[in-house]
Image: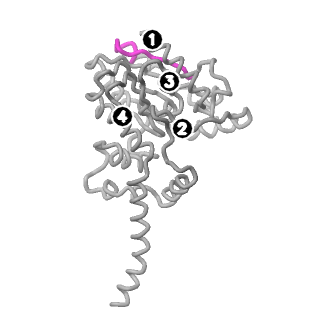
C-alpha cells in the first residue's frame, strides 16, 4: 500500500506543480482582460464614447482618431452576451457617456451562448473583469482556477507568446487592438475569404435572443440619454460573397428595424463601403491600422452628425 501511495504521489506531484505554475501565470501576467478592466475602472469619469464588439471593432475602431474621449471595450471573440454584461456593470459609473457603439457582424445575431471560444473565455471575464457570468455555476472548479479553464497546449502557447513579446496585452491605452499592421495581398485574400466565411457560418437564422439583448442595451441607453450607433464593420467583398445571402438580408432587416423603432439609434453600415480597399485589410474581415484610421474618422463624422 505504501509503495502504491508513493507511485501515486510521484505521478501527481509534477501535475500539481504545473497546475500551480499555470495558475500563477494567469493570475500575475496582465492581458487584455485585466488591462481593459483596469483602464475603464480608472478612467471612466471622462469617457464620452464607448465601443463594444468583437475583434472587428477591437482592431477596427481606434479612439485616437475620434474627437470625443473614447474607450474601446471590445475584445477578440467578444459576443453580445458579454457586451451586455460589461455595459450593465459600468454604465452607472460613466457619467459623461454620450454615445455607445455596438458592432453587429455576420456572427453577432446568431451566436449561441457557451459555444466555441466562450467555453474558456467566460472564466476570464469572470475572474479578470469582475463580471458575474450566469453561464458559470458556483460549483464549477474552473470558476476558481483559470489554469483549469484552458487546455495545457493553449496555456503553453500563451506563455511562449509572453516570453517572446514580453507582454500579453495586445491593445493601447484606449483599448484599440494595435497589432494588426500588415496588409493582405490579393491571392491570399482569395483563399482567406473562403476559409473565414466557412468558419463563421453556424447555419442559424435564429436572431431572437441576441436581438433582444441589443434592444435591452438600447433601452438602457434611452434611460441615460445615450445615443447608439449600430455599426456593421467593413469586410472584404470576397469574404462577403461567400456568406449566406439570406442571412445577410435578415441581418440588414434586423439592424434597419432596430434603427427605425428606436429614436436614439443610428445604423452605420460600412460592410459594403467601397472606400475600403485591399490595402486597408489585415485579412478577409479585419482592418489593419491604416483601415482602422479610415474607419474611425468615418465614425467620428457620424457622431458629429447627431
Q: Earlier in the sequence, mark 4 or mark 1?
A: 4
Where disc 1 sits, the SS reads helix
Rendering quarter of residue 5: bottom left
Q: Earlier in the sequence, mark 1 or mark 2?
A: 2
Nearer the observer: mark 2 or 3; the answer is 3
For the point 31% across and 46% down, the residue is 135
Q: Earlier in the sequence, mark 3 or mark 4?
A: 4
Give the Cα distance between marks 3 and 1: 18 Å
Q: Is residue 206 left or right of residue 95?
A: right
Give the Cα distance between marks 4 and 1: 24 Å
Is label 3 in contact with label 1 (beta carbons under 8 Å)? Answer: no
Nearer the observer: mark 4 or 1; the answer is 4
Nearer the observer: mark 4 or 2; the answer is 4
Q: Position of residue 196 (x, y in %)?
A: 59, 38
Is label 4 in contact with label 1 (beta carbons under 8 Å)? Answer: no
Towards the viewer: 118 or 43: 43
Q: Position of residue 244 (x, y in %)?
A: 56, 30
Other residues around mark 2 within 10 Å, as few (<14) / some (14–19) / many (≥20): few
Give the Cα distance between marks 4 and 2: 30 Å
Towards the viewer: 256 or 188: 188
Nearer the observer: mark 3 or 4; the answer is 4
Give the Cα distance between marks 1 and 2: 33 Å
Where disc 3 sits, the SS reads strand
Taking the magenta stretch, the answer to whether it contains residue 269 is: yes
Give the Cα distance between marks 2 and 3: 15 Å
Is label 4 in contact with label 2 (beta carbons under 8 Å)? Answer: no
Other residues around mark 4 within 10 Å, as few (<14) / some (14–19) / many (≥20): many
Disc on res. 40: 4
Disc on res. 232: 3
* Residue corresponding to mark 2: 200
Amino acid at each position: 500500500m505504501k509503495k502504491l501511495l508513493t507511485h501515486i504521489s510521484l505521478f501527481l506531484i509534477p501535475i500539481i506543480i504545473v497546475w500551480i505554475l499555470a495558475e500563477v501565470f494567469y493570475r500575475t501576467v496582465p492581458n487584455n482582460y485585466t488591462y481593459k478592466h483596469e483602464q475603464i475602472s480608472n478612467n471612466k469619469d471622462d469617457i464620452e464614447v464607448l465601443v463594444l464588439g468583437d475583434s472587428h471593432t477591437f482592431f477596427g475602431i481606434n479612439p485616437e482618431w475620434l474627437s470625443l474621449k473614447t474607450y474601446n471595450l471590445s475584445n477578440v471573440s467578444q459576443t453580445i452576451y458579454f457586451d451586455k454584461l460589461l455595459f450593465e456593470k459600468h454604465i452607472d459609473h460613466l457619467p459623461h457617456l454620450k454615445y455607445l457603439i455596438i458592432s453587429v457582424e455576420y456572427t453577432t445575431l446568431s451566436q449561441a451562448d457557451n459555444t466555441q471560444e466562450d467555453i474558456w473565455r467566460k472564466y476570464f471575464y469572470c475572474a479578470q473583469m469582475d463580471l458575474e457570468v450566469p453561464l458559470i455555476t458556483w460549483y464549477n472548479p474552473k470558476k476558481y482556477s483559470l489554469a483549469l479553464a484552458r487546455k495545457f497546449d493553449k496555456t503553453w502557447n500563451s506563455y511562449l507568446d509572453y516570453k517572446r513579446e514580453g507582454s500579453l496585452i495586445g491593445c493601447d491605452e484606449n483599448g484599440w487592438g494595435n497589432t494588426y499592421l500588415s496588409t493582405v495581398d490579393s491571392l491570399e485574400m482569395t483563399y482567406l475569404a473562403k476559409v473565414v466565411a466557412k468558419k463563421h457560418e453556424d447555419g442559424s437564422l435564429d436572431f431572437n435572443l441576441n436581438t433582444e439583448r441589443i434592444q435591452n442595451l438600447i433601452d438602457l441607453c434611452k434611460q441615460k440619454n445615450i445615443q447608439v450607433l449600430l455599426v456593421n464593420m467593413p469586410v472584404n467583398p470576397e469574404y462577403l460573397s461567400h456568406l449566406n445571402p439570406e442571412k445577410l438580408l435578415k441581418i440588414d432587416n434586423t439592424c434597419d428595424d432596430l434603427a427605425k423603432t428606436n429614436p436614439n439609434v443610428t445604423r452605420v453600415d460600412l460592410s459594403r463601403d467601397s472606400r475600403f480597399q485591399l490595402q486597408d485589410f489585415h485579412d478577409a474581415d479585419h482592418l489593419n491600422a491604416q483601415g482602422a484610421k479610415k474607419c474611425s474618422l468615418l465614425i467620428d463624422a457620424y457622431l458629429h452628425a447627431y
